[in-house]
Amino acid sequence: MKYMTALQDSKRLPRNASIAFHLAALLTFFIYALYRLTHDDLFLFTLFSLALVPISISLGLEIKHRGNILHKQITLILVCITIAISCYSLGYKSLIYVFPTIFIFFFIFNFKNASSISSFYVLICLIAALNIETYSLVWRFGVAIFDCIIFAAIFAYIIAKQKAALIYLATTDELTGALNRKNLATSLSSSIESFKHTGTDTSLLLIDIDHFKTVNDTYGHLVGDKLLTQFSEVIKQLLPAEAKLFRFGGEEFLVQYEHCDLQKALEMAQRLKQAVNQTDFDGVPVNVSCSIGVAELRINDSLEEWLKQSDIALYAAKKSGRNRVVSRLDK
């Protein structure tokens, strides 16, 4: 669940690509509307002209940075309805426009919905085309179009896997598997905004491995790396889904614990400290402990102040003898 937000962001159609899609749709429908007008087909001219309206609105919102995925989904559905109606009047001449729209489904719907909605859309268009086309022709188009759905689904699946892998590499510390600092500021800022608007409690637990430099200097960096990796696993196993673990730097780790007040954060910190104390770290010939500074988010905290208070609390825990949990000291 730690990468869910990033994965969701990755599924959004990039703005420039979205604008290009809109412009291509506008040009296609505009030309086709004029073409139907030259053939005195007022019904389809009106139909395609009306289809330009939602596309234009959606494009305008996108240009003004106000577009969202719902606008795009509604626009695509309206376009598909227009194509389905035209299939009833034009048969295969409109069926050819089903092919490009299929791929767009997989850009703006999740995989399951894209597969089911596009299949239903294709079925409606094929049935509509039977109004003037033979079963043989519609059958051939149907095979080709459903093949297109399969290819689009495979392509979307491969792209989704690649995106997930890239997101993991971009947001994850290679050694420990914890989140890296790349998105830390964004994540903490989101918690601050949530706290201001909804009062959602969030606490930080800044964790430092005691005497880590001594382990590195005495036993070497390979042992130090092994300790960091195992230490991260111990912490992650105890954290609930609403908590994120970041590697803050060196031997320091930061837990961002949402829906968590000070008391709950202190209880978690004590459990983490005890778990570290009770763990035999493989290949590490010393007893390992940690110090933890806890800082709950307060109404006037900036991102910098919140982090500063967790750092001050950690320093106090180390200064008082290490292997301690200390909460923020300001009142």
Image (tube, grey):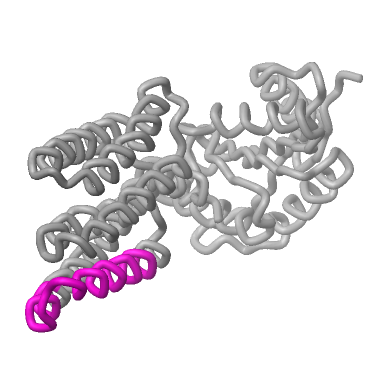
Q: Position of residue 288 (x, y in %)?
A: 65, 51
Give the answer, above or below, for where 295 lies relative to 33. Answer: above
For image coordinates 22% across by 43% down, the residue present is 42
Count how many numbered circles sit on residues in the image: 0
Residue at the spot 23% in from the left edge and 48% down from the top edge: 44
| Picture coordinates of residue 35, whole percent (x, y) | 10, 40
Q: Which one is nearer the viewer's eye here, 53 or 217? A: 53
Q: Is 118 positioned to the left or the right of 196 in the image?
A: left
Q: Which residues are magenta?
A: 115-141
Query: To which quarter of the image does residue 293 belong?
Result: top right
Report if residue 135 lies within the magenta region: yes
| Residue at figure coordinates x 62%, y 27% from the top left | 189
Quadrant location of the N terminus in the rendered image: bottom right
Magenta part, dominant SS: helix
**Residue displayed at 64% across by 38% down:** 208
Instruction: Estimate the x, y position of residue 259 in percent, counting from the top left.
Output: 77, 45
Q: In the shown orientation, is residue 14 left or right of residue 219?
A: left
Q: Is residue 210 magenta?
A: no
